Image: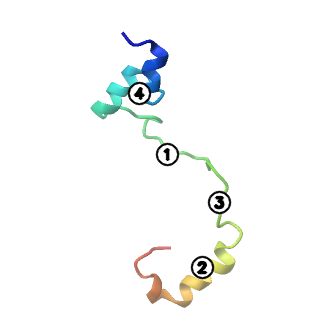
Amino acid sequence: MVAPKKRQQKTGGFSVSTGRRIEQGKHQPNKGKPRSWRTRKDPFAGVWESELVPMLEREPQQNRDYSV
């Protein structure tokens, strides 16, 4: 039998029961609820409205595959 610590190293740090749930498709890390908070600072916050939106509006044909 593999010691629990060794087993966790082999499974990526989670328990065997969690591994089984993931394999069976039953793993729900946050029960399907969307987050209401940011996980990091928005990298475009300072330039989105002032630079990026006008650039996208100026040349819509170049950006037709992307939605804003």
Q: Report the amino acid beneath label 3.
A: Asp
Where's residue 67, x and y in %?
Answer: 45, 74
Above or below 10: residue 3: above
The CA distance from mark 3 to mark 2 is: 15 Å
Q: Which of the two discs, 3 and 2, labels the residue nearer the N terminus?
A: 3
Q: Nearer the viewer, residue 33 or 13?
A: 13
Give the label, 2 or 4, closer to the camera.
4
Q: Report the amino acid beneath label 2.
A: Val
Q: Is residue 39 left or right of residue 17?
A: right
Above or below 31: residue 17: above
Q: Residue furthest left?
A: 24
Report crowding for label 3: few under 14, some 14 to 19, many 20 or more residues within 10 A (C-alpha).
few
Report the residue marked by disc 2.
Answer: 53
Give the label, 3 or 4, closer to the camera.
4
Q: Residue furthest top?
A: 1
Q: How many marks?
A: 4
The CA distance from mark 1 to mark 3 is: 18 Å
Q: Nearer the viewer, residue 8 or 68?
A: 8
Disc 2 on helix, strand or loop?
Answer: helix
Give the label, 4 or 1, closer to the camera.
4
Give the label, 1 or 3, closer to the camera.
3
The CA distance from mark 4 to mark 1 is: 27 Å
Report the residue marked by disc 3.
Answer: 42
Report crowding for label 1: few under 14, some 14 to 19, many 20 or more residues within 10 A (C-alpha).
few
Where's residue 68, x and y in %?
Answer: 50, 73
Q: Residue 34, labelled with which disc?
A: 1
Report the residue marked by disc 4.
Answer: 11
Where's residue 21, x and y in %?
Answer: 34, 27
* Residue 16, quarter of picture: top left
Q: Report the amino acid beneath label 1.
A: Pro
Give the label, 3 or 2, closer to the camera.
3
* Residue 51, quarter of picture: bottom right
